[in-house]
Structures are given as C-alpha cells and as structure tokens.
Image (tube, rainbow, N blue to C red):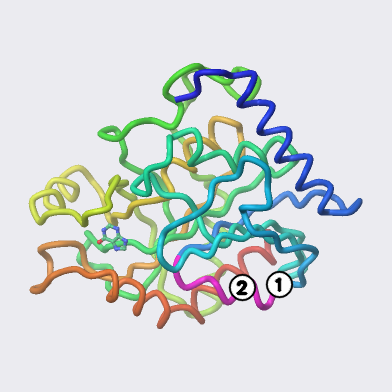
C-alpha cells in the first residue's frame, strides 16, 4: 500500500524521465504491450529504439517469474511505435501491490494511452481448448486485494473508478476481426484472476465457472484495474494453454503451460502484430 504519496510520485516521475531520456528525442509511444508466455519472439521482430533491463530503470522492480526476462523495449512493431514489457510482475512473486503496477503508472504518465495485456490462462469453458485464444471482455477479482487499496492517487484517477467497461469494446472487436482474417480461433470471455502461485483446486474451478468465468490466470487484472483507473484503453488476450484443474485427468504443470504457450507462439505473435498494425 502507498504510505507516502509524494515519494511514490517522485519515483514515478524519476523512472519516467529516465525512459524519456532513453528515447533520445523520439516521441513517446502511445501503446504498451505486455508480453505473456510465448510472445517473446516479438522482441526480435521489433525495430528497437532501446532495450533496457528493468534493473537500469530507477525504482523499477525486477521480474522473478520463470520465462519472464525483465526488459523494457521501445521500438517499432507493425508500423507503430510501442513499448514492450518483456517480463511482468505477479502478485505471487511477493511485490507490494503498488510496485506490481508501478510500470503502468510510469508509462501512463509519460504518454502511453493503450495497454495490451497478454497472458497464458487455463480454460474453464469447455468449449475452449488449448491452444486457442480469448479476447477478454471482463474479469472476476472481487476476492482479491485491489491495486487501488490505500490512499487514492487523485492526480491519476478517482477514488471509486467505474469498472463497467475495463476492456475497450472497440479493441475487442478489432481483435476478433484480426483473428478471423488470420484464421485463428478466438472467442470472447471472462477472465478469473487468482493470486496464485498454486493452481486452482477443482472446487475453485467449479465455483468460478458458476460465477461466469471462461478462463483463469494469475496476472492481467491488477494491471487492467490500474490502467483503467488512469483512463487508459485496455485490451486483454489470453492464450488457453491447458484446461483448468479438474476438467481433464492429471495434474496441471508449469511445463504444460509453457510448452503450449511456446507451441502457440507463432499464432500469438501473428495475432498481436496484426492487432497493433490495425490499431
Ligand atoms: N490457472 C492459473 N493460471 C494459469 C493457468 C491455470 O490453469 N494456466 C496458465 N496460467
């Protein structure tokens, strides 16, 4: 929780100024793409302006999750200037909640207006099978600590932000159009956020299904809530890497998640590239 707003703001500005200095006079990209599992190859096809380890950015946390590298890239992808977060921060890594979303506030303050969040998720809706895609239309997270808990940053947004449309409707439609044109299977869905790091129990998955969830994962929602608080446009894309607990026989494993995300990588990258191009 933020206990000193002035200090937190100073850190946000300091990190933002560092990033601006690394752009060497270029316009600040308006899009930030957060790379979930399987999207790493996009860092190779992007025409880079800079690539800096998070550890070089003042007050930026370091990412510790497996498969999450920890570099901020600015560059041109599909003809658009973008930031790419190669490696994200998860609650289960132990960060204070305001640290988890620090990067969004830094980038939002310097000019980013659109946040594209990608992730690997477990399929709850049995009509979804790995490795297909979900355009996130809404989420469930009322049982989790809010990233907005504590003093409100009035400079960024209101104390009680509306959440009736966290995920931009036009971006959902655009994503569907891109998937259709590329022949990639994508459906709309509600993402259930769980704090992890343990996978869910079969009973939890049954409960989440009853509550209206289509897929489940351990990321994205803190970022989406923080970004919507600041008035950013948010898009969320899940790659279904496994059926959620209790649906198929056998245990869930990180290996299955990463193997499927990697197998779907070419499709994920094609979808995101097209999405950015048409934005
Ligand atoms: N549960 C939570 N997070 C996940 C899953 C899952 O089944 N698959 C990929 N990330």
Instruction: Specify start and end residues of the magenta stretch as a single range.
Output: 37-45
Q: Specify the label residue 206 is tagged with.
A: none
* Proximity of marks 2 and 1: CB atoms separated by less than 8 Å: yes
Task: Please indicate whether residue 169 sits to the left or right of residue 119 in the image.
Answer: right
SS at mark 2 in the image: helix
State ligand 1's quadrant.
bottom left
Q: Split into 4 quadrants, where in the image is the N terminus?
A: top left
Q: Identify which residue, 153 or 18, lies in the foreground.
A: 18
Dot 1: few (<14), some (14–19), or many (≥20) neighbours within 10 Å?
A: many
Q: Residue at 59% of width from left, 23% of height from top?
A: 157
Task: Please indicate whether residue 135 sits to the left or right of residue 273 in the image.
Answer: left
Q: Indicate the quadrant where residue 83 lies.
A: bottom right
x and y, in percent, of residue 263 in the image? 40, 83
Q: Residue at 30% of width from left, 45% of height from top?
A: 195
x and y, in percent, of residue 50 in the image? 77, 63
x and y, in percent, of residue 130 in the image? 30, 74
Task: Please indicate whether residue 122 sits to the left or right of residue 94 in the image.
Answer: left
Residue beneath disc 1: 46
Residue beneath disc 2: 42
């Amino acid at each position: 929780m933020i206990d000193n707003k002035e200090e937190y703001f100073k850190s946000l500005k300091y990190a933002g100024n560092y990033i601006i200095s690394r752009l060497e006079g270029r316009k600040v990209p308006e899009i930030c793409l957060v790379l979930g599992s399987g999207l790493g190859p996009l860092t190779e096809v992007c025409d880079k302006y800079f690539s800096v380890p998070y550890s070089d950015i003042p007050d930026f946390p370091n990412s510790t999750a497996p498969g999450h590298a920890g570099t901020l890239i600015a560059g041109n992808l599909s003809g658009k200037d973008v930031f790419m977060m190669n490696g994200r921060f998860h609650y289960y890594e132990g960060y204070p909640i305001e640290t988890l979303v620090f990067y969004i506030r830094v980038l939002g303050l310097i000019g980013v207006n659109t946040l594209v969040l990608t992730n690997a998720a477990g399929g709850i809706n049995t009509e979804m099978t790995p490795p297909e895609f979900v355009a996130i239309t809404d989420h469930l997270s009322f049982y989790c600590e809010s990233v907005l808990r504590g003093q409100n940053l009035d400079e960024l947004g209101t104390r009680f932000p509306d959440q009736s449309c966290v995920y931009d409707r036009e971006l959902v439609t655009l994503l569907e159009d891109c998937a259709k044109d590329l022949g990639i299977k994508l459906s709309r869905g509600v993402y259930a956020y769980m704090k992890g790091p343990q996978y869910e129990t079969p009973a939890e998955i049954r409960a989440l299904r009853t509550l209206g969830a289509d897929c489940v994962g351990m990321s994205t929602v803190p970022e989406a809530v923080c970004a919507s608080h600041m008035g950013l446009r948010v898009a969320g894309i899940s790659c279904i890497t496994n059926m959620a607990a209790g649906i198929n026989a056998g245990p869930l494993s990180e290996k299955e998640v990463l193997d499927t995300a990697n197998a779907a990588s070419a499709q994920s990258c094609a979808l995101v590239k097209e999405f950015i191009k048409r934005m």
